[in-house]
Amino acid sequence: MTDPVHERRQLTGLAYRLLGSMSDAEDVVQEAYGRWYALSEPQRDAIASPGAWLTTVAGRICLDQLGSARVRRERYVGAWLPEPLPGEAAALADPADRVTLDESITMAFLVVLESMTPAERVAFVLHDVFGYPFAEVASVLGRSPAASRQLASSARRRVRAARAPEPAEGSAAVVRAFKLAWEAGDIERLVGILDPEATVVADGGGLVSAVRRPIEGGERVAQYAVDLAGRIPALTLEETTVNGQPGLVALRDGGVVAVMAFEVAGESVRRIWAVRNPEKLRRWQAA
């Protein structure tokens, strides 16, 4: 079997959406291909659709990892956020689907996926995002097609309940205005840009300092941002793309110390996800 770039890219995109970690996703894809090449040539020749076989194997590996990940995250210091991706996120938005892949790669969407059970998450991503029929989803989950359909339906309700408004065309301008007000230490302007119920969630993983509980309320978020800038000397902000959406990257001494993803509603910032865990920022150091 050839190893087409498209096949590997789709498997990586699937595994990233399921696990929220690109490094883990790459390990899953490597393991799936390893199992394929461990088959004898007659065994491989007998498989009608190598792509479907690889997807099933990768999905099962992810399902196993999701079960153990829930236990690990209970011990995680502070909030756990998915690994943010730089511009390369567009490479994971390839197949056609019913939920636009631009949406399914955003931080907001990935955070909703984290609220699901492992089985719900696998059923939903395979069917609603990648368009796999429930017969194939069932083979990954080890359940009936009817049970798999119910899992996807339950996950769909979670997505609808948490669905953010469609990103406005002016999202980049709102993030830029936030950046300028932050750099100026202008609390009043920040409050005007932030939704009154704005929230900040930070992920330091216990490796660097970060608030362990969400900061809620526009005024509190604005004050926190200004105080933070005052505590960290020589901090610079740059506009960037985070998981396909406008965001900010914070640098100090040339190194990336935080990546911030935003949820923008109209002309206001509703949510900010700030990833500070250095283990999740390795791709950004070379971006």
Image (cartoon, rainbow, N blue to C red):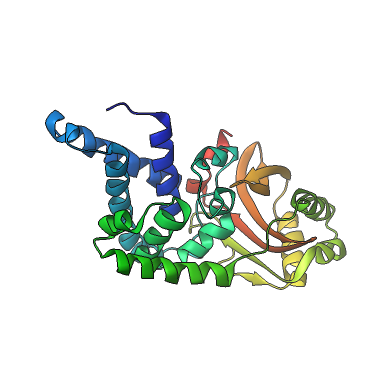
Give whichever of 163, 100 is nearer the camera: 100
Give whichever of 14, 143 is nearer the camera: 143
Compared with residue 206, is residue 21 higher up or lower down, i.e. above or below?
Answer: above
Residue under the point 48% across and 59% down = 206
Residue 194 appears left or right of 162: right
Residue under the point 77% across and 61% down = 266
Q: Is residue 224 visible?
A: yes
Residue 224 position, x and y percent, is 72, 65
The number of numbered badges drawn on the structure is 0
Compared with residue 189, is residue 37 higher up or lower down, i.e. above or below?
Answer: above
| Residue placed furthest toward the top | 2
The quarter holding residue 124 reads: bottom left
Q: Is residue 75 visible?
A: no
The quarter holding residue 73 reads: bottom left
Compared with residue 254, is residue 177 higher up or lower down, i.e. above or below?
Answer: below
Give whichever of 79, 96 is nearer the camera: 96
Residue 237 appears left or right of 131: right
Residue under the point 43% across and 63% down = 76
Residue 237 position, x and y percent, is 73, 45
Compared with residue 34, is residue 183 higher up or lower down, i.e. above or below?
Answer: below
The quarter holding residue 48 reads: top left
Identify the image quadrant of the C terminus.
top right
Residue 276 appears left or right of 239: left
Residue under the point 27% across and 28% down = 1
